Image (tube, coloured by chain):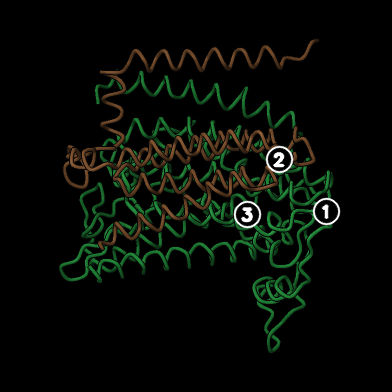
Chain colours: A brown, B green
Amino acid sequence: MSVELIIFFFLSALLITCSLLVIFQRNAIHSALALVAALFIVAILFLTLNAPMLAVLQILVYAGAIMVIFLFVIMLLSPGTPERGRPLWWGFGSLAAALLALEFFAFFLPSQVTKGQGMGAQVAEGFGSPKMLAESLFTDFVLPFEIASILLLVAIIGTVVLAKREF
Amino acid sequence: MIIELSIIVAKVVLVLFMVLNLAGIMGWFERKGSALIQNRIGANRASVFGFAGLGLVNTLLADPIKFLTKEDFIPPGGDKALHTLAPCLALFPALVTFAVIPFGDVLIIGQRVINLQVANINVGILYIFAFASLGVYGIVIGAWASNNKFSLLGGVRGAAQMISYEIAMGLSVIGILMIYETLELQAIVRGQGALLWGWLPAWGVVLQPIAFFLFFTAAVAEAKRIPFDLPEAESELAAGFHTEYSGGKFLMFFIAEFAEMVTAAALITTLFFGGWQVPYLISDGFHFPGGGTLLLPHLAVVFLQVGAFTFKVFFFAWLFILLRWTLPRFRYDQVMRLGWKMLLPLAFVNLMVTAVVIVALGT
């Protein structure tokens, strides 16, 4: 039982708890905050996997910007009263959950487990550092990078046009 | 293994102790300083055995005791859990950000070289931006959980302001990252020890003066200090997002504001004013450009460096306080215009000019 394994189990237990809280809370804001906590724990899991850049980006972008937008939408446009549960949804939900669980356990059949050698893949020195990320982003993947930034630009321009005041 | 762990724990305890104490002392500076600026005496009634210490006893002993023993009030209709959670969410980023700020060079004890920084992660400054972006939650949740329209207004304004100025803050730092060619804060501070033309320390403010002003403005806005204190505009919104807070929770918001101020001052010091660097001091003593040297023992050098860092942080925190009691508050639309139409384009221009100069000089 190495220290890494104990930390991993502890973090995973916390993460599963937060994820369950997201689904089962009545109040939408509590759900959103549980999701923030879950994303934060995922970032810490990235840290344990030796990817500090990804961890920091996860907190910066996902937990720090996207979830703030979620929270604002829920706060300012919330329905007010929590909805009643519907029996049809429970049925479909249980079916979907059963299918996902089946797929999850099928992944852990003996033939699949022996394919992965050891506890982790071999990575180069400096893996996960900003330098390596930048090198691959600006040499191998520069076209997808530029296309993604144009996509973001289109979204920003669309937002400005939609939210413009008529003078 | 145990020794390394205990060294890390010692550094964490030291840094937390330092931040919380600096936050408390800044609270005293604020009260006494504001009193002197406004030509009054300030709080001086509480005293211990007749020693009132310029209001020190009042601010640092009497006030915390008062805050902690006040009734804890959750507004009816407010969300109980979130009302209690919000001050913790506000305090957490302010304290945790200090983990990557270097407060000294290295401390050599026997064979062991201890880097005077709690965590030297390779994404250095991005860590700080990540936790600054988490600072929005404290305000928003605190405002929401109070079930009070004034609080909600203050919270929404505060969130919009903080999100806008995070961008300007990040962009203004990229020039510094380009010049010192690293993201790690300790490496940036070490890079500021170089001498330009033999006599000028290559501090960030010398190489990137515009970025310094942009970052300073954005940091004041992030810390929600006057002139950017829309979220708590006292004359407009009662007390903004912390209207419905009393007692220990208000104390947490209060300490969170001063801790944020101290962290912002430490960041400005680290990026633009050489961090722990004393001009002409290297690891074995002073080496003046004229040729004179003054050799010093290692502990004296470490002491001077940590002292220089603390002095610079004090100076910038004092500057924040001076700014608060001098300038009037911005209007909301003025704040937004400043952030998006003035700081952001200036940051871009600074970035381009820096890039052109770096390529032209070939360094």
Of badges 1 and 2, the one in the foreground is 2
Closer to us: A88 or A149: A88
Judging from the image, mark 2 belongs to the subunit labelled A
Q: Quadrant of residue B300?
A: bottom left
Residue B216 appearing in the image: yes
Say left or right for B317 vs A135.
Answer: right
- Residue appearing at x 46%, y 45% in the figure: B128
Q: Which residue is mark 3?
A: B257
Q: Which residue is mark 1?
A: B77
- Residue appearing at x 62%, y 40% in the figure: B221
- Residue appearing at x 62%, y 60% in the figure: B255
Q: Which mark is residue A48?
A: none
Q: Quadrant of residue B236?
A: top right
- State the SS at label 3: helix
Residue B85, position in %: x, y? 64, 57
- State the SS at label 1: loop
- Residue appearing at x 38%, y 18% in the figure: A145
Looking at the figure, which quarter contains the C terminus of chain B?
top left
Whether the residues at callouts 3 and 1 have beta carbons within 8 Å, the answer is no
**What's the residue type where badge 1 is placed?**
Gly
Residue A68, position in %: x, y? 61, 37
Q: Which residue is mark 2?
A: A85
Q: Earlier in the sequence, mark 3 or mark 1?
A: 1
Judging from the image, mark 1 belongs to the subunit labelled B
Local crowd size for mark 2, using a 10 Å CA cut-off: few (<14), some (14–19), many (≥20): few
